[in-house]
């Protein structure tokens, strides 16, 4: 059955009707369309219609644990140590319950695709993978879920490397890791590329998540990708140290990253939380070199990363929150920031961008706002979320001011 969405305000200011065909693709966008027999009609009542956002970097297995797993120091090693001390006893049911709550919160906010890293290490093994695969089976028709196997010390702990292989056998889609916290980061990089290459899978690595301007994991990654001819898709997440270098170094590295075809995901929320705690004055923002990467032609996206866990005690699973931080802390323009959490987020996930035009997948979000800037600034609660032409989430609010006469 086709669907007709009436009275949608487009970013350009035009009000249109949008028809979606049985395959979930947009078939018509016109000033006014007449409902066909049996067609489902949804009146968007002048809401701003946007392409649905995607979350390119989450940690669903850790979501919503901030109260149970506190991180008093607030920095990255404090978070890792807190998780090691408390996080391993989670059960499949517990992880599934928390991850499900986070995904549905994101869906209500418009997220119809999410890439989540998932721990694969001793002693929790593949328990988190089991939980998130169960979630993908359950909610995959509403939210496209990609999983990244996040391994630690694969060079020194062969058991962890075998767990990563097991996770990939189970259905994990992407090979991950954190070279910047490893003893032999280049060996970890080699292992990662070899394993992903054997299986024809993409790579998504936590990279340079520190404020050391000498850190060069992003550059090593770009050069290794070029020298090996790896072709299955590479993403580097965080890349914070690049933001600490001088402009010339930023441009030179950004150029090599672009040439290697490596995408970058900036994660303002977690890095504003974790980084810079040992710089009490003129505290660095903990963001990568957004402009230098963008101007070099790198596909740069924005993500929310951790949500209310020891790595970030805040977070609402809302792309408007991420976009707002990219404007406030990263000095992007609002429409740029919105592109980074929508089209660019899908691109780094290997998904086609969405357009409000015939032929595009009808993953859409309608909000009460007059412009992208207003939507990012206001993060309206009132939202209608559309996946493949079907309304999959709807939030409405009732507001009163009884004291006003
Ligand atoms: Zn992460």
Image (cartoon, rainbow, N blue to C red):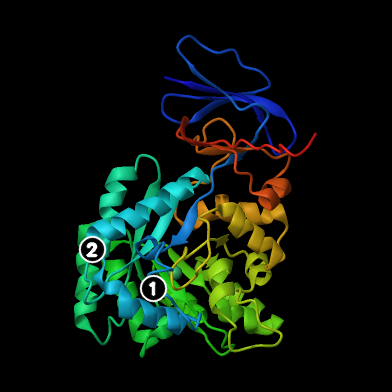
Q: Nearer the viewer, residue 247 or 61?
A: 61
Q: Quadrant of residue 358?
A: top right
- Quadrant into which the C terminus falls: top right
Question: Residue 69's mark?
Answer: 1
* Ligand 1 located in image quadrant: bottom left
Is the CB of the residue bearing disc 2 within 8 angstroms of ligand 1?
A: no
- Quadrant into which the N terminus falls: top left
Q: Residue at x 50, y 38 (%)?
A: 363
Left/right placement of residue 369 relative to residue 73 reads right
Task: Give the secondary structure at mark 2.
Answer: loop
Task: Give the secondary structure at mark 1.
Answer: loop
Left/right placement of residue 128 relative to residue 10 reads left
Give the x, y percent position of residue 310: 44, 73
Left/right placement of residue 297 relative to residue 303 reads right
Q: Residue at x 21, y 58 (%)?
A: 170
From the viewer's perspective, is residue 29 above or below residue 55? above
Is the CB of the residue bearing disc 1 within 8 angstroms of ligand 1?
A: no
Number of numbered discs on residues: 2
Residue occupied by mark 2? 91
Give the x, y percent position of residue 388: 45, 34
Q: Nearer the viewer, residue 119 or 26?
A: 119
Give the x, y percent position of residue 190: 34, 80
Give the x, y percent position of residue 35: 55, 13
Q: Residue at x 47, y 58 (%)?
A: 56
| CA neighbours of label 1 inside 10 A, class few (<14), some (14 to 19), many (20+) | many
Q: Quadrant of residue 187?
A: bottom left
Observer able to see residue 172: no
- Residue lying farthest to the top in this orientation: 37
């Amino acid at each position: 059955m086709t669907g007709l969405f009436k009275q949608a305000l487009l970013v350009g200011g035009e009000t249109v009707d949008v028809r979606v065909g049985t395959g979930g693709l947009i078939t018509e966008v016109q000033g006014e369309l007449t409902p066909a027999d049996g067609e489902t009609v949804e009146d968007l009542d002048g809401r701003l219609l946007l392409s649905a956002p995607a979350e390119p970097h989450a940690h669903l297995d850790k979501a919503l644990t901030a109260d149970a797993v506190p991180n008093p120091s607030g920095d990255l090693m404090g978070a890792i140590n807190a998780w090691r001390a408390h996080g391993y006893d989670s059960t499949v049911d517990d992880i599934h319950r928390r991850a499900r709550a986070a995904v549905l919160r994101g869906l209500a906010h418009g997220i119809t695709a999410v890439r989540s890293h998932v721990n694969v290490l001793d002693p929790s093994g593949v328990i988190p993978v089991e939980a998130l695969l169960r979630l993908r089976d359950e909610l995959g028709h509403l939210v496209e879920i990609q999983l990244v196997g996040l391994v630690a010390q694969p060079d020194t702990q062969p058991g962890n490397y075998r767990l990563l292989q097991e996770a990939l056998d189970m259905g994990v889609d992407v090979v991950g890791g954190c070279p910047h916290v490893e003893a032999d980061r280049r060996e970890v990089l080699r292992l990662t590329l070899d394993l992903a290459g054997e299986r024809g899978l993409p790579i998504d690595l936590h990279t340079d998540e520190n404020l050391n301007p000498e850190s060069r994991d992003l550059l090593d990654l770009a050069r290794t990708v070029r020298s090996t001819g790896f072709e299955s898709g590479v993403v580097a997440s965080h890349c914070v140290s690049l933001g600490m270098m001088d402009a010339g170094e930023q441009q030179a590295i950004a150029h090599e990253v672009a040439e290697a075809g490596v995408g970058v995901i900036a994660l303002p929320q977690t890095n504003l939380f974790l980084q810079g705690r040992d710089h009490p004055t003129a505290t660095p923002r903990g963001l990568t070199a957004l402009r230098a990467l963008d101007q070099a032609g790198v596909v740069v996206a924005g993500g929310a990363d951790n949500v209310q866990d020891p790595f970030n005690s805040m977070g609402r699973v809302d792309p408007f929150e991420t976009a707002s931080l990219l404007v406030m802390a990263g000095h992007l323009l609002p429409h740029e920031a919105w592109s980074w959490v929508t089209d660019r987020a899908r691109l780094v996930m290997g998904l086609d961008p969405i357009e409000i035009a015939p032929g595009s997948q009808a993953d859409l979000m309608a909000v009460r706002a007059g412009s992208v800037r207003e939507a990012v600034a206001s993060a309206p609660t009132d939202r209608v979320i559309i996946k493949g032409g079907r309304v999959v989430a709807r939030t409405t609010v009732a507001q009163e001011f009884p004291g006003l006469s």
